[in-house]
Image (tube, rainbow, N blue to C red):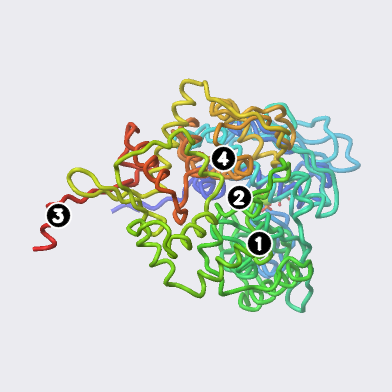
């Protein structure tokens, strides 16, 4: 039998390797930016067209390459950064595998222009799918310009696999942020489709964070500094009250390299324990410096995961450093671990009852403010703690005659947990009905029906009602809005702004009126009827987070998503007690819906039990 094993030709090997290094345009961006940093550049320009599908270009003023190096740089395993296996233990550069340029040039049209300081002329090389098409001398400034066009031109399957431009651009911006955050001493500019998206001058770390995430970030940063024998920590964490609903302000850098570490993330979360509510994430921008010998960055081809020799120690140091900073800046007052979690709910506004319009929105509930609230609420907190029976008593409220002691107690609790959301039920609905409803555990509404009984999930039911309402407004485009006395100004990062801009028109159809929509700032002069001003920033943040999660799914509809997201933010929550009238209104409105049986996210809204079912149980 003849031999059958052959060595793969280089261009095939490169294409295979490329699959590992280049998943999407953002991977190219990362590799090129890192090469420029390794080349000692202090100004780096990133130019993107059509989310990188048409063009990705990086121009730097680094040390450039000689003719020979320029040619060699596209060979696989060609690197100037390590020479022997030992060097792997003292890596101070971003790259070291010598794979990026070989991989990229295997699957795109690449043009390199490079010149070293002191040379009169530079080198121009054009490569398409690993084949050198053109090489020449050229006039070019000191440094390197590398442009990558038509990514995946020879792998149609990969090209078709790319997501929408919005999604791909988000990935690119994420990579850009990571690299720019790790190097505040380098100036970065980014252009997308001819307009400037970011302009980040060299600055200190705080300014870099603020330049990327917007002016509002400044006030929320708390410095963290710690130096021990094994680890140096520097950077910032966010004040707990600014915790976000998304994880997109969480950054760890180890020796100037962005990394992901669930374990270290856990250390931070544990430092915030009791300070932020579930579903919120603290912001952090932390640089860890360790001896390169104590880490292994080689375990992942795209190098965002690394292995530490002594993770446990790092965990402990990190946690205590963050705790210390939060404490030092008087952000972590005395903790009360006996608190009833049910009271730490988003619909429990600390600003409730304040009537003057305020521009600063209380974006998150601070559980510690609770203790200084009115004596009335303290009394209720106490009564919850000391009399667990009270909750049981409230079970019978609907069945008792008016004026009993229990009912008075119940109505106090009810008042306390009532939110502005209740205005969703307009007063003119105060109609007498004979239907009897009953609220169970502030979660379910029980209603008698002809055949027996119906149990309805109040949160899901209300979501359905709001969702259909918003959808209607969005489709017929004539929502009613309520004018704000003073415009509400909110700040967002540029990438969040980009996202909101895409939804602006739809938001207007729900009743939002914007007077300004530029740079980092949105001014709102009108909001949809029944949307409390204090909820606006929560709605928009929720929306951003929903869109970010949803867009990965290519066929999402902005209208539907907006309606879903807003109904999620605004629906009455589990734990909120409702008056009889509200309960009845909820039931009636649900059955006026087109699809009453499921929530907008397809969860069951109610179940029924017939008298027959009961009879069977009593047999
Ligand atoms: P690695 O970065 O792992 O060494 P690359 O394929 O990314 O591998 O780059 C190969 C080599 O090309 C680098 O080691 C470097 O010497 C050179 N190079 C790449 N980009 C630049 C640049 N922007 N400026 C100067 N040299 C560069
Ligand atoms: Mg590289």
| In front: label 3 or label 1 | 1
Looking at this view, is 363 or 357 the one in front?
A: 357
Q: Where the C terminus falls, by quadrant?
A: bottom left
How far from the left and from the top, in percent, is residue 605? 33, 46
Quarter of the rendering containing residue 67: top right
Q: Secondary structure at mark 3?
A: helix
| The image quarter in which residue 530 lies | top right
Q: Considering the numbered disc 1 on the image, is that residue within a helix, a strand or a loop?
A: loop
Q: Which residue is mark 2?
A: 76
Q: Earlier in the sequence, mark 2 or mark 1?
A: 2
Identify residue for label 4.
106
Tell me if I can see residue 72 in this picture.
Answer: no
Tell me the residue that label 1 is attached to: 374
Whole-Å distance between the Cαs marked 4 and 1?
Answer: 68 Å
* In front: label 2 or label 3: 3
The structure residue drawn at horizontal position 47% and vertical position 51%, both measured from the top left corner, is: 573
Residue nearest the viewer, comparing 102 with 201:
201
């Amino acid at each position: 039998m003849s031999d059958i094993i052959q060595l793969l030709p280089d261009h095939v090997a490169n294409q295979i390797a490329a699959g590992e290094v280049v998943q999407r345009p953002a991977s190219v961006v990362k590799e090129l930016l890192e090469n420029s940093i390794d080349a000692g550049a202090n100004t780096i320009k990133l130019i993107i067209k059509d989310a990188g599908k048409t063009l990705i270009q990086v121009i730097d003023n680094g040390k450039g390459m000689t003719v020979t190096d320029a040619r060699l740089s596209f060979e696989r395993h060609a690197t100037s950064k390590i020479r022997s296996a030992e060097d792997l233990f003292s890596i101070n550069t971003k790259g070291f595998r010598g794979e990026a340029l070989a991989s990229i040039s295997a699957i795109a049209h690449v043009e390199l222009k490079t010149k070293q300081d002191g040379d009169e002329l530079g080198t121009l090389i054009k490569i398409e799918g690993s084949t050198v098409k053109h090489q020449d001398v050229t006039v070019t400034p000191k440094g390197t310009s590398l442009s990558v066009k038509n990514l995946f031109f020879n792998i149609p399957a990969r090209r078709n696999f790319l997501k929408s431009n919005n999604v791909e651009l988000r990935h690119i911006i994420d990579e850009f942020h990571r690299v720019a955050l790790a190097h505040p001493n380098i100036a970065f500019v980014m252009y997308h489709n001819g307009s400037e998206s970011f302009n980040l001058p060299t600055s200190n770390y705080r300014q870099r964070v603020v330049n990327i995430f917007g002016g509002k970030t400044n006030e929320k940063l708390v410095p963290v500094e710690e130096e021990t024998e094994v680890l140096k920590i520097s950077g910032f964490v966010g004040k707990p009250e600014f915790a976000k609903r998304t994880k997109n302000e969480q950054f760890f850098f180890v020796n100037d390299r962005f990394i992901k570490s669930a374990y270290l993330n856990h250390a931070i979360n544990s430092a915030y324990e009791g300070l932020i509510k579930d579903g919120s994430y603290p912001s952090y921008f932390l640089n860890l410096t360790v001896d390169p010998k104590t880490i292994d960055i080689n375990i992942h081809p795209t190098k965002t995961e690394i292995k530490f020799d002594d993770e446990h120690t790092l965990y402990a140091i990190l946690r205590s450093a963050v705790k210390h900073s939060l404490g030092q800046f008087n952000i972590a007052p005395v903790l009360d671990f006996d608190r009833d979690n049910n009271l730490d709910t988003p619909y429990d506004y600390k600003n409730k009852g304040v009537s003057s319009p305020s521009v600063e929105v209380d974006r998150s509930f601070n559980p510690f403010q609770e203790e200084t609230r009115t004596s009335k609420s303290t009394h209720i907190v106490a009564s919850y703690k000391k009399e667990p029976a009270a909750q049981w008593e409230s079970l019978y409220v609907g069945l008792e005659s008016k004026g009993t002691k229990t009912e008075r107690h119940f109505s106090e609790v009810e008042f306390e947990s009532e939110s502005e959301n209740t205005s969703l039920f307009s007063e003119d609905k105060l109609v007498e009905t004979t239907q009897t409803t009953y609220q169970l555990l502030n979660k379910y509404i029980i209603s008698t029906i002809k055949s027996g009984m119906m149990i309805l999930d109040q949160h899901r039911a209300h979501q359905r009602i709001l969702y259909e309402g918003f959808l209607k407004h969005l489709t017929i485009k004539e929502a009613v809005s309520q004018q704000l006395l003073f415009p509400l100004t909110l700040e967002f990062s540029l990438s969040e702004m980009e996202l909101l801009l895409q939804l602006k028109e739809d938001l207007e159809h729900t009743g939002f009126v914007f007077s300004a929509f530029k740079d980092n700032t949105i001014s709102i002069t009108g909001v949809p009827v029944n949307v409390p001003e204090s909820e606006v920033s929560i709605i928009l943040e929720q929306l951003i987070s929903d869109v970010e999660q949803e867009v990965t799914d290519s066929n999402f509809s902005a209208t539907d998503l907006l309606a879903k997201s807003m109904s999620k933010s605004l629906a009455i929550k589990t734990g909120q007690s409702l008056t009889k009238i509200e309960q009845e209104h909820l039931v009636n409105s649900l059955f006026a819906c087109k699809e009453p049986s499921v929530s907008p996210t397809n969860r069951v809204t109610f179940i029924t039990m017939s008298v027959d079912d009961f009879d069977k149980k009593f047999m």
